[in-house]
Amino acid sequence: MAECVVIADDLTGANATGVLLKNSNYNAYTVLNTERLDLKLLSDSDCIIYPTDSRAIDSSIAYNRVYNVAKLLKNQKIRVYSKRIDSTLRGNLGSETDAFLDALGEDFVAIVAPCFPEANRIVSGGYMLVNTVPLHKTAASVDPKNPVKTSSVKEVFEIQTKYPVASLFIGDIMKGKEFIANKIKEFKKNGFRIIIFDCISKEDLDVIASGVIDSKIPFIAVDPGTFTATISRKLITPNEIRSKNKVLATIGSVNEVAKLQVDELFLAQALYNVYVNTRELVESVEKRKQEVNRVVEEILENCTDYDICTVIGDGIMPENRLDLNNYARRFNMTSDDISNYINDSLAEITYQILVKNHDFKGLYTSGGDITVAISKRFKTYGIRLLDEVVPLASYGEFIGGDFNGLNVVTKGGMAGDKNSLIHCIQYLKEKLFM
């Protein structure tokens, strides 16, 4: 049974969105013959895409078409409702969004994320830019059927909709998913049914999607397809995939770059994290065993509702970093021995989690020493290198050992910019669905 319904104003846009969903391994079907629509024949589909051919017609007729289709396809099992709009804001955006909202009921809000980063359509400060040119100065302004005379997304909607419109800008997006979730709830409480978001990158769309989900407000995605694909990946498991393919990230890096990347990941993704008390790992064998068991049990007990789990050494926070030399003198060892003890403990935690929960199909490791320690614990012969995710971050598969074929992304702790960890995790998630 489909869990995603997309109503598009034309066939080309419908198919374009379908391709985006297909790239995430969803079975997407575009309805061509509306007179012979049999929903039973689409029972194996993840997404039903229904074009209404309503972009260039009278707004009242467009309203009726979208309203009737939304009523037809409305179902309690649908997790993502999407109103596919033109990437240059042409057509009956307001009236069609109104129709969708009216068909679904007053609990729903419209989340408008009209950017298409891959096609150089972005929204910044409320204004759409196409290849860095304001929309009203592009060919869209002289379109013979649907000319667009303003670059303000909010203005386009306010001219056409009967509902109050609110906006969130880049500065708001940068505050993360919790802030976004709270703003959505605030807007909903104050009667706003349409919320327009700035968005200039795929990372922005990812953060917005997480905020929308965390708000728990029923929504319609209003966008050219990219936001629909993004939020579908977070909410819908393709029918062909029987188990959730989870990603485990083990991070032992202790530097400011790694800390910044972790902070950005926490803002962008819904995940479950456990910090490892590294001091406990080196105090005694018994304390090490207790800390390893604590972390493993906490991940296993709480991972069910999360596609991503992270295990992070608490030394990533400056106040928790150990003086390895002090421990080396205390135990008559070298500082490298102490460091290796911590790395081996993180490797043991990783090993036990993967042994006890087979839903973890992807692994991310940060820090060369961590990767080496994990490879040794897994009895891995090597890594079959398949791709570069970002500079100094590699994707591949473990060869041999206890987890032969495991998908893995490895990155140096100091490598990349603040978004590199987000890129790596998202890349790994996408590979698991291919």
Image: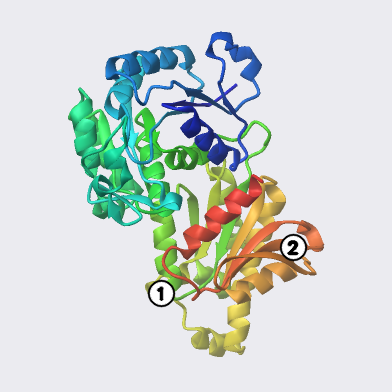
**Can residue 275 be seen?**
no
Circle 2 packing at 10 Å, graded few (<14), some (14-19), many (20+), is many
Q: Is residue 88 left or right of residue 253?
A: left
Q: Please tell me how many numbered marks the rendered image carries.
A: 2
- Specify which label sits upstream in the sequence, 1 or 2: 1
Kind of residue indicated by mark 2: Phe
Kind of residue indicated by mark 1: Glu
Label 2 element class:
strand
Q: Nearer the viewer, mark 1 or mark 2?
A: 2
Residue 302 locus on image (x, y percent): 53, 44
Numbered tag placed on residue 333 in the rendering: none
Q: Image quadrant of residue 418?
A: bottom left
Residue 146 locus on image (x, y percent): 30, 32
Cα separation, mark 1 vs mark 2, equals 29 Å
Residue toward you, 352 or 163: 163
Name the residue: 74% across, 62% down: 398
Task: Identify the residue position indicated by label 2 in the image.
Answer: 398
Q: Image quadrant of residue 362?
A: bottom right
**Where 6 falls versus 72 (above or below)?**
below
**Can residue 377 be seen?**
yes
Task: Identify the residue position indicated by label 1 in the image.
Answer: 256
Name the residue: 31% across, 29% down: 93
